[in-house]
Image: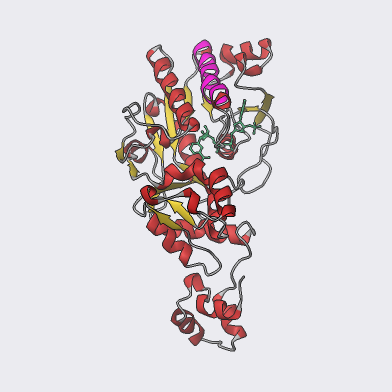
Amino acid sequence: MTGAAGLVGAEVTARLAAAGHQVTALVHNNPVLVRNDGTALETGAVTCLPGDVTEPRLGLPEAEYRALAAGGLDRIVHCAAVTDFGLPDEVYQAVNVDGTAHVLELARAGGVPLVHVGTAYVCGERDGLIRETELDEGQRLANAYEDSKFRAETLVHKAQAGGVRAAIVRPSIVVGDERTGVVRDYKNIYVVLKLATEGKVRSIPGQYEARLDLVPVDYVADIITEVTQRFEEAAGRTFHAVGAPLTLRDFSDVMAEYPPFHVPRFIPPTSFDTQRLPRRERVYYERVMTLYESYFRRRMRFDDSHTAGLVTRRPPGDGQDFLRTLIDNCLETGYLGVPMADATEVLARLNITGPNATAAAHATGAPHGTGSTVSDANGVGR
Ligand SMILES: NC(=O)c1ccc[n+]([C@@H]2O[C@H](COP(=O)([O-])OP(=O)(O)OC[C@H]3O[C@@H](n4cnc5c(N)ncnc54)[C@H](OP(=O)(O)O)[C@@H]3O)[C@@H](O)[C@H]2O)c1
């Protein structure tokens, strides 16, 4: 397992270890395996090896590398990557592209099947239905990260033609746990959410019909684990690990349910003018939002027939409900300010108690049992 200490890698490692496998975990800067819920991973069935995918032999001592290639592995799961946006091109090349080449060398040398973790966004800026069987459709890739993942996947396909057995799993935008919303690392889309809800970024170039695809980390880890364990059925195929479709309209509607939040306006990109932004907002826009803005224009929909045919678990059925779960968790942990007061609590402060409280809560239009009107009027929950 490369990238074993990462958000997805730690969850897959935990699942494989729990299923009785001995996992050899390649670790890099961070040697500690922590699960998404913050608990330390049981290391009994896991052997950590310090390494670096940018280096030949994954940076391992020659003897160790040879031992792995000579029967020390049944599968390789390649999760390591740089996933932050806005880094120099050379970093994506070294880690995501050359790193994949080095992993493929080990797979080739040892005759070991490979599960490669890509991204659904190798589709670039294509609109419409994106199939698991498609890769190079002449699409424009939106940034250096997508470009590197596209080239990495192309290397996997070439290696397959040369005899390496591989399956590919492509997650979309990985976020918190489906049931609890808990996420270990608030990165990427979470930063956008924070800037928007705090009102630091009030207008964003985008289309309300654009689609964001948010997928729970536990669902992604389940799919990668299943593909790894049932490799004979998965070999040679690609699996989308994607969530429930959520348009920017859906996104805005959910944000508007939370009284403390600012709701950004999405402005058609052709009429958006950076120069008209207030100076402070322009700084946030130029430093952060420009990295993500193509995600607010795309209208793709990911087909996941291969995944549906292999695993029984399905992604969240309702994108808006899932978004509420994520936001509620961000409020509980303080990432997006303090949690709003519960409706019953707010009504109790107004001396409205008993069975009518629920009806009264509905009358206030309170989302999730929070008294939006009441809390606004009383400054509760800010
Ligand atoms: N997160 C998403 O939204 C998302 C969406 C689609 C696809 N994916 C794909 O899913 C996979 C896992 O992503 P993630 O969210 O778990 O990312 P992550 O939390 O950033 O983890 C990436 C892991 O890769 C390791 N790594 C980075 N450079 C390395 C190097 N030179 N040598 C060895 N290991 C190195 C990191 O170790 P250190 O931190 O110690 O350097 C880290 O453990 C990646 O392939 C990513 O492209 C992620």
Q: In this view, does 173 lie above or below 381?
A: above
Looking at the image, residue 244 sits to the left or right of residue 259; the answer is left
Q: In which quarter of the image is residue 308?
A: top left
Q: Mainly helix, strand or loop, the magenta region?
A: helix
Q: In which quarter of the image is the C terminus?
A: bottom right
Residue 36: x %, y % from top left: 60, 45
**Which residue is depicted at the point 40% across and 54% down?**
267
Residue range corresponding to the magenta coloring = 93-109
Q: At 54% from the left edge and 15% from the top edge, which residue is drawn? A: 106
Asked which quadrant contains residue 157, the reply is top left
Q: Quadrant of residue 354?
A: bottom right
Q: In which quarter of the image is ligand 1?
A: top right
Is residue 246 in the magenta section?
no
Q: In this view, does 209 lie above or below 361?
A: above
Q: Which residue lies furthest to the bottom in this view?
A: 351
Give the farthest residue toward the left: 128
Look at 55% across and 56% down and name the residue there. 278
Residue toward you, 76 or 22: 76
| Residue 56 left/right relative to 289 | right
